[in-house]
Amino acid sequence: MNSLLAAGTSPEFALPSIEYRLISPILLVLGMAVISVLVEAFVPRAHRRVVQLVLTFSTLIVALILVVMLAGQRAVTAAGSLAVDGPALFMQGTLLVLALMAALLVAERGVDPAGDAFAARANALPGSIDEREFTKRGWLTTEVWCLFLFSVGGMMLFVTGTDLLILFVALEIMSLPLYLLAGIARRRRLLSQEAAMKYFLLGAFSSGFFLYGSALLYGFAGTVDLGGIADAITANAGQNGLLIAGTALIAVGLFFKVAAVPFHQWAPDVYQGSPTAITAFMASCVKVAAFGAMLRIMYVALGGVRWDWRPMFWVIAILTMFVGSIIALTQTDVKRMLAYSSVAHAGFLLIAVVATNEEGLAGAMFYLLAYGVATIGGFGVITLVRDSTGEATHLSSWAGLGKRSPWVAGAFAVFLLSFAGIPLTAGFIGKFAVFEAGVAGGAGWLVVAAVLASAIAVFFYGRVIVILLFSVPAADGPTVVVPSSFTAFAIAAGLSLTVVLGIIPQPFLDLAEKASIFVR
Amino acid sequence: MTASSVLAATSNSGAEIVFWVCATLAVIGAVGMILSKKPVHSALFVALTMINLAILYVALSAPFLGMVQIIVYTGAVMMLFVFVMMIVGVDASDSLIETIKGQRWAAIVLVLGFAAMLIGAIVNGLQGVPDPSLVAANAEYGGNLQGIAKIIFTDYVIAFEVTSALLIVAALGAMLLTHRERHTPKATQEERSKARFLRYAATSELPGNLPPAGTYARHNAIDTPALAPDGSTVPASVPGPLRERGNVRPVDVAAEVEVEEISEGKTVVAPINDEDGEQR
Amino acid sequence: MNELTPTTPSPIAATEETLLWFGHDPLWLVILKVVGIFVILVLVVLFTIWLERRVVGRMQQRIGPNRTGPFGLLQSLMDGFKLAFKEEIFPTAADKAVYIIAPILSVVPAYMAWAVIPFGPEVSIFGQATPLQLTDFPVAVLYILAIASIGIYGIVLAGWASGSTYPLLGGLRSSAQMISYEIAMGLSFVAVFLFAGTMSTSSIVNGQVDLWFGLLVLPSFLIYATAMIGETNRAPFDLPEAESELVGGFHTEYSTMKFALFFLAEYINMVTVSAVAVTLFLGGWRAPFPISMWSGANEGWFPMIWFFLKIFIFIFVFIWLRGTLPRFRYDQFMRFGWKVLIPISVLWILIIAIIRGVSDEYGLTATPLAITAGFILTVAVLWILGRNVKRRRVKNLAENTIPEKFKPNSGGFPVPPLPGQEYRPARRTVVADVGAATDAGTTSVSEEVRGG
């Protein structure tokens, strides 16, 4: 009895050291997101939009500056749960740049006569008297800015986290706001709500896979730390059921997020139904964040068993590239076509994961940047082509757009060329870097398949460009709205980055290369 | 022999019984959740599973986790599920339509295959894994609670804190999708009362409650309109749907007949036929 | 119950040394305790029902049950028998399985919560030293909360399974109400945990030797006292069974023993929340101040007297409230829970955590700080609430000025006099008022048996 009592004094907790400087960008974004919720609560409705705009843009810019200042840091902090290293900082930077561009699209209020891209009140029934009343009063759903910031914060955490627990929390912080944002379009609200529902259900399902995989890996390694899992793999040579099953399930969870075939089914519907500005954000930033996490998990934790998971990734990559490219050929809706194009790009990016070498990591990071800027630019153009019911996304109504609005059509053509990987655009350099890494990583046949798939992709991008520039415009076709400087700036930035990354890619490639070592 | 060693010896067989009972019930709950046709039954089966899991946690020396599991999952999450199902009135017929042919069989085959694969993998992976009980971990910091506190506030402090961001998003999202803001202030009781009387002044629509069916009439059936003091009927006292369908019992006529009959000394207990000719 | 005790006591912190009392009982003693608790609860419930009817009767100037047994003490028992012998009724639309499970789900958790309630200190039963408490473990208070949250299912499912509208609405109301007030309830425990350093009930009682936590964390106690009334669906928070709106609420379609089980569960819950209040805030079985000077008051079987005395004070308050206060409106009630109780709880936890942190850091004693802060917060909140009510009253008065002269026919419509106006009765011929005399002679003996 006495011995039990004597043992009663519990040892003091050793508090973990957290280097706040290293995680300041993430803390800033998440902290400001919380403040923007308070803005929603306390600032009068008339001033909310302005306050939120200032808050969001200044947060993103300051966070970007902080990330740039941290360049070159390599450390694991916060009791081993966050790894601030080259890839993390590069991806955080990429995310912030893309988020800034997407935020410009979200901020646009000039193209829709009724207001911005979001429903006046998300809870008013579509077509109800309430909805008309809210619209008439010019109410805006300014909560989108809170959700936007939370999502960006989650993405930054997702590319930085280095244990499975924090990766899961980050995955949810990233996704949950997106499920909401997808469902609150101002136009075609039922379609938008359906998209949100699908995205939510399938996203929750995929999170379940990720969590199950994490649990199995924890069962295998006794830790959720990525480095610890790698150590456990080195210690236990030979196959282990928990390890294999855990790896497969985690990969499935991530395949959902990057929309790899056969886990891509949600993408077209969600891309089509969401407000286009949000689609741009989703298509670019989620892909960056999900690939960032996938590269970290596969390289750091599971690099030791790469011979076990590579065959699965081979199959998925080939399927993704071909299915994405071929189905994109048959699409008649521009947004759906870009959705399948993004599926195909996920396939190309998977080559970099399969490569499991530094070149692969660097190539993927460059590819993600190139793909992201072109995607935001492309969706930015889509917001401008409108008829009386909203955006005119049917491909037939885009026919001959080049004759009426050569600048807009030209910009869109450049983005498509970049997607297709035509030289002198960013997409070409990205693809080249990834293919090179694939060959170096022993995935030569995969690269051959990728080149074939690229050829198919070139065909369907080319078809759109032909329709856009050389066919006869329809008499009652859509008009191209002149946007406010928000969208104009976003498209211009996308265009110039696409061209600059295509013509002088070397500094960026060097940067990516320098940043391409994970710390554990 | 110390007290703890006795406990350790007795608890082993006890823990085994607890495991087999609770594990069986938990699996029954999980299977029942899928197989039951009514959503509320499914929710109850899930609650059963969760409670049994909680007991298993307690048996594995994680009492805090067990209790929190019940409070949070059974008490809050599942309760809200049940709540929503009751409000929305989800019905079995809503969910059991197969949109893709053969989907159910394909799903069953795939699920069984997946389950077999996972079980195989897990059984294979768990060979030689030591006792999962938390006794040793609990002893380290003087108790289960203290141990959990240590882990949450040191190793996983970031995960713990950013979870708050998740909760804020969830709350914000719920507000965004469901919280109805008013574009015009809600009419108070006083304002509504005033409006009622103004309407009365303008259209002579009665401001008070409508007379219930059957008032002053011979029958209190719901299709029998009330009689005003002057003997005329008050059609508004019969519910609208009945009036729409023309199911109003013509009592004023009947009343006059009865008055006549009474004054002539005839019987008054004659049955009244309604429109279908059915006797009541 | 046995599986809920920790299988092995880990090295125990100094604040939780009473946990060492537990886990040594032989099987016969465990069974004896279980049966003892069951019997005590049934007796307490029967007595409480009688007490309620008598007290409410007295408050309403009538007598209450006085025929069956001495002072009518056996009335509740007879009512129970009556219910047992009534005809079993199943509504056609009922979901039969759930309909039967619901009352059981309601009553079993009500009993289970008593497993961790301490009745007294260690005593000797047939030569075996054992505490007057079935069991205890490091998270016993959480266990009570968990069990309470299972008990809600009984009510919700009863409402749903009846297949009828009023019960459904009653069930939904009650679940919303209980979940909401459970949050405030759980938050009010946090301050106690912070000072007791444990969640085991016996240790919490042990921690109140010098000072009751009710005084130390006064706001928590008051919040708990409010929340416990909401949690038990008692007047003035008895919206789930508001007779004027919902007939009987969730148990409208229930009769016979199944109804009796709900009835039993409600009264046990009433006793349970009182017992928890006593245990956590009023020193548990410890003798109140002047008696506690006598050292024997806290030893042996005496503490059970203090314990039940304290519980019945709470029960009396329950009854008193029911006899005095009108029912809340549903939206007002929910607003009160979410916008008053919970924010104040959170604020108070913040204050108390800061006090604990600062006093630990600088080696101060937290007690006087906590008492002062608690007192200030209580007074401030009461003052703000009172001021708001007063303001509203003043505003109402300012908006509706009452003319001094009463016009019986203002606006062409006969109206009663407003406050402050004098009623001038119309002149009429005086007739000997026969009716009034007979009215005064009859006492209304109508009495309701409160349901569920």
Image (tube, coloured by chain):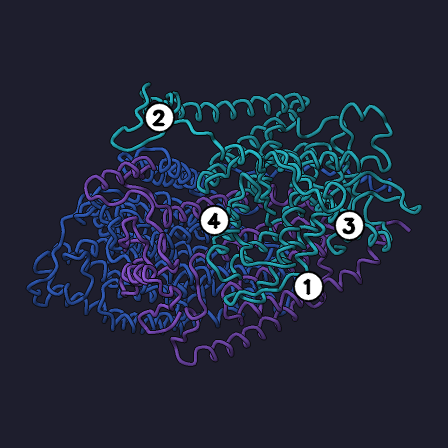
Chain colours: A blue, B purple, C cyan
The residue sitting at 55% across, 46% down in the picture is C178
Q: Residues within 10 Å of mark 3 (few under 14, many from 20)?
A: few
The picture places residue C102, in percent across and down from the top left corner, at: 60, 59
Spatial CA distance of label 3 from label 2 is 64 Å
- Cα–Cα span, label 1 and label 3: 29 Å
Q: Residue flagged by tag 2: what amino acid is it?
A: Ala
Q: Residue C39 bears which disc, if any?
A: 3
Q: Depth check: B9 or C261 in front?
A: C261
Where does the image place residue C17, in percent across and percent down from the top left?
79, 39
Q: Amino acid at mark 1?
A: Cys
Quadrant of the snapshot with the N terminus of chain C: bottom right
* Structural crowding at the residue carrying mark 2, measured as other residues with C-alpha within 10 Å and reported as few (<14), some (14–19) or many (≥20): few
**Chain of the residue displaying label 2:** C
Image quadrant assignment for residue A468 = bottom left
Foreground label between 4 and 2: 2
The residue under label 1 is B22
Residue type (three-letter) at the residue carrying disc 3: Val
Q: Closest to the observer: A64 or C27? A: C27
Determine if residue A92 is in view. Answer: no
Identify residue type, mark 4. Thr
Are the residues at dot 1 and dot 3 in contact (C-beta closer than 8 Å)? no
Kindly report the distance in space between the C-alpha atoms of the residues bearing marks 4 and 2. Answer: 87 Å
Task: Residue under label 4, please give it.
Answer: A160
Q: Read off the chain for label 4.
A: A
Looking at the image, residue C246 sits to the left or right of residue A279; the answer is: right
Q: Is residue A374 above or below residue A245?
A: above
Read off the residue under disc 2: C426
Mark count? 4
* Left or right for B27, reference B162: right
Front-lying residue, C434 or B206: C434
Of labels 4 and 3, the one closer to you: 3
- Secondary structure at badge 2 equals loop
